[in-house]
Protein backbone atom coordinates (compact mmCIF):
# COMPACT_ATOMS: atom_id res chain seq x y z
CA UNK A 1 0.00 0.00 0.00
CA UNK A 2 2.77 2.45 0.93
CA UNK A 3 5.52 0.53 -0.87
CA UNK A 4 6.66 3.04 -3.50
CA UNK A 5 6.68 5.98 -1.10
CA UNK A 6 8.66 3.99 1.44
CA UNK A 7 11.19 3.03 -1.25
CA UNK A 8 11.55 6.68 -2.25
CA UNK A 9 12.25 7.71 1.34
CA UNK A 10 14.83 4.93 1.75
CA UNK A 11 16.41 5.93 -1.60
CA UNK A 12 16.96 9.44 -0.24
CA UNK A 13 19.26 8.07 2.44
CA UNK A 14 20.86 5.03 0.84
CA UNK A 15 21.38 1.95 2.93
CA UNK A 16 23.69 3.25 5.67
CA UNK A 17 22.58 1.64 8.93
CA UNK A 18 23.29 4.84 10.92
CA UNK A 19 20.38 6.64 9.31
CA UNK A 20 17.67 4.43 10.83
CA UNK A 21 16.16 7.01 13.21
CA UNK A 22 16.11 9.78 10.62
CA UNK A 23 14.52 7.37 8.18
CA UNK A 24 11.82 6.43 10.70
CA UNK A 25 11.18 10.11 11.49
CA UNK A 26 10.69 10.80 7.77
CA UNK A 27 8.27 7.90 7.46
CA UNK A 28 6.41 9.14 10.54
CA UNK A 29 6.25 12.62 9.00
CA UNK A 30 4.96 11.27 5.68
CA UNK A 31 2.32 8.80 6.95
CA UNK A 32 1.77 10.09 10.53
CA UNK A 33 2.73 6.61 11.79
CA UNK A 34 5.13 3.74 11.11
CA UNK A 35 3.30 1.03 9.14
CA UNK A 36 4.53 -2.57 9.60
CA UNK A 37 5.16 -2.57 5.85
CA UNK A 38 7.77 0.18 6.35
CA UNK A 39 9.57 -1.80 9.07
CA UNK A 40 9.63 -4.86 6.81
CA UNK A 41 11.00 -2.90 3.86
CA UNK A 42 13.68 -1.14 5.92
CA UNK A 43 14.64 -4.50 7.40
CA UNK A 44 15.05 -6.05 3.94
CA UNK A 45 16.86 -3.14 2.34
CA UNK A 46 19.13 -2.11 5.21
CA UNK A 47 19.65 -5.69 6.46
CA UNK A 48 18.62 -4.75 9.99
CA UNK A 49 16.56 -7.30 11.97
CA UNK A 50 12.83 -6.48 12.02
CA UNK A 51 12.77 -6.79 15.83
CA UNK A 52 15.53 -4.19 16.21
CA UNK A 53 13.66 -1.63 14.07
CA UNK A 54 10.44 -2.41 15.96
CA UNK A 55 12.23 -1.78 19.29
CA UNK A 56 13.56 1.60 18.07
CA UNK A 57 10.12 2.59 16.75
CA UNK A 58 8.51 1.60 20.08
CA UNK A 59 11.08 3.50 22.14
CA UNK A 60 10.82 7.00 20.67
CA UNK A 61 7.72 8.98 21.65
CA UNK A 62 7.90 10.86 18.32
CA UNK A 63 7.27 7.59 16.47
CA UNK A 64 3.90 5.84 16.47
CA UNK A 65 3.21 2.23 15.55
CA UNK A 66 -0.52 2.96 15.29
CA UNK A 67 -2.21 5.21 12.73
CA UNK A 68 -2.79 8.72 14.03
CA UNK A 69 -5.95 10.62 13.12
CA UNK A 70 -5.99 13.99 11.39
CA UNK A 71 -6.64 15.66 14.76
CA UNK A 72 -4.87 14.68 17.96
CA UNK A 73 -6.88 15.22 21.15
CA UNK A 74 -5.02 15.19 24.45
CA UNK A 75 -6.97 15.23 27.70
CA UNK A 76 -5.00 15.93 30.85
CA UNK A 77 -5.22 13.39 33.68
CA UNK A 78 -2.49 14.99 35.79
CA UNK A 79 -3.17 15.65 39.49
CA UNK A 80 -4.25 19.29 39.14
CA UNK A 81 -6.65 18.47 36.31
CA UNK A 82 -7.78 15.25 37.97
CA UNK A 83 -9.07 17.08 41.05
CA UNK A 84 -11.02 19.39 38.74
CA UNK A 85 -12.71 16.52 36.90
CA UNK A 86 -10.20 15.58 34.17
CA UNK A 87 -11.41 11.96 34.17
CA UNK A 88 -15.00 13.12 33.47
CA UNK A 89 -13.73 15.15 30.52
CA UNK A 90 -11.95 12.11 29.14
CA UNK A 91 -15.15 10.04 29.60
CA UNK A 92 -17.12 12.71 27.74
CA UNK A 93 -14.69 12.69 24.80
CA UNK A 94 -14.68 8.88 24.73
CA UNK A 95 -18.49 8.85 24.66
CA UNK A 96 -18.62 11.51 21.98
CA UNK A 97 -16.12 9.77 19.70
CA UNK A 98 -17.09 6.21 20.71
CA UNK A 99 -13.47 5.20 21.22
CA UNK A 100 -11.27 4.66 24.26
CA UNK A 101 -8.15 6.73 24.98
CA UNK A 102 -5.15 5.49 23.00
CA UNK A 103 -7.24 4.85 19.88
CA UNK A 104 -8.23 6.48 16.61
CA UNK A 105 -11.75 6.80 15.22
CA UNK A 106 -12.48 4.41 12.33
CA UNK A 107 -12.64 7.38 9.91
CA UNK A 108 -9.12 8.40 11.15
CA UNK A 109 -10.40 11.88 11.97
CA UNK A 110 -9.45 11.86 15.67
CA UNK A 111 -6.87 10.19 17.88
CA UNK A 112 -7.54 10.41 21.61
CA UNK A 113 -4.87 10.35 24.24
CA UNK A 114 -4.87 10.78 28.03
CA UNK A 115 -1.72 12.62 29.17
CA UNK A 116 -0.09 13.44 32.49
CA UNK A 117 0.33 17.21 32.30
CA UNK A 118 -0.06 19.82 29.58
CA UNK A 119 1.88 22.48 31.44
CA UNK A 120 -1.02 24.79 32.34
CA UNK A 121 -2.25 23.19 35.56
CA UNK A 122 -3.90 26.35 36.95
CA UNK A 123 -6.38 26.35 34.06
CA UNK A 124 -7.51 22.73 34.39
CA UNK A 125 -9.19 20.65 33.45
CA UNK A 126 -7.27 21.00 30.21
CA UNK A 127 -7.65 19.48 26.79
CA UNK A 128 -5.62 20.19 23.67
CA UNK A 129 -6.78 19.57 20.12
CA UNK A 130 -3.86 19.79 17.71
CA UNK A 131 -2.22 23.08 18.85
CA UNK A 132 -5.33 24.61 20.43
CA UNK A 133 -5.45 24.68 24.25
CA UNK A 134 -8.82 24.61 26.04
CA UNK A 135 -8.87 25.40 29.76
CA UNK A 136 -11.63 25.02 32.34
CA UNK A 137 -13.27 22.43 30.11
CA UNK A 138 -16.72 21.23 31.13
CA UNK A 139 -18.51 18.10 29.97
CA UNK A 140 -20.91 20.25 27.94
CA UNK A 141 -18.02 22.17 26.31
CA UNK A 142 -16.47 18.94 25.01
CA UNK A 143 -18.97 18.55 22.17
CA UNK A 144 -18.64 22.20 21.16
CA UNK A 145 -14.84 21.97 21.13
CA UNK A 146 -14.93 18.84 18.98
CA UNK A 147 -17.40 20.34 16.49
CA UNK A 148 -14.81 22.93 15.49
CA UNK A 149 -12.79 20.11 13.90
CA UNK A 150 -15.64 18.39 12.05
S1 LIG B 1 -2.03 18.64 35.53
FE1 LIG B 1 -3.24 19.16 33.83
S2 LIG B 1 -2.10 20.71 32.86
FE2 LIG B 1 -0.85 20.10 34.50
Image (cartoon, helix red, strand yellow):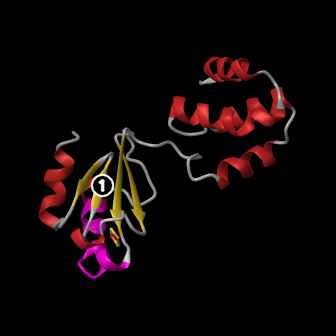
Going by the picture, which residue comes out furthest to the right?
47
Residue at horizontal 38 percent and vertical 74 percent from the top: 78
- Tell which quarter ligand 1 is in: bottom left
Q: Residue 138 vs residue 117: left or right?
A: left
Q: Position of residue 38 (x, y in %)?
A: 67, 32
Q: Is residue 133 above or below residue 12?
A: below
Residue at horizontal 71 percent and vertical 37 percent from the top: 39
The secondary structure that dominates the magenta segment is helix
Q: Position of residue 142 (x, y in %)?
A: 19, 58
Q: Residue 64 vs residue 21: left or right?
A: left
Q: Which residue is mark 1?
A: 128
Q: Nearer the viewer, residue 78 or 138?
A: 78
The residue range painted magenta reads: 79-95
Residue 143, by quadrant, is: bottom left
Magenta stretch: includes residue 125: no
Magenta stretch: includes residue 82: yes
Amino acid sequence: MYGDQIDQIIDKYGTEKGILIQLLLDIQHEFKWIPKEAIKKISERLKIPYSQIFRVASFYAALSLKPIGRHLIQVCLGTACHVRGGAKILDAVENELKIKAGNTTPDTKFTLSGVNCLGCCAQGPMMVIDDDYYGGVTVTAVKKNLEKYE
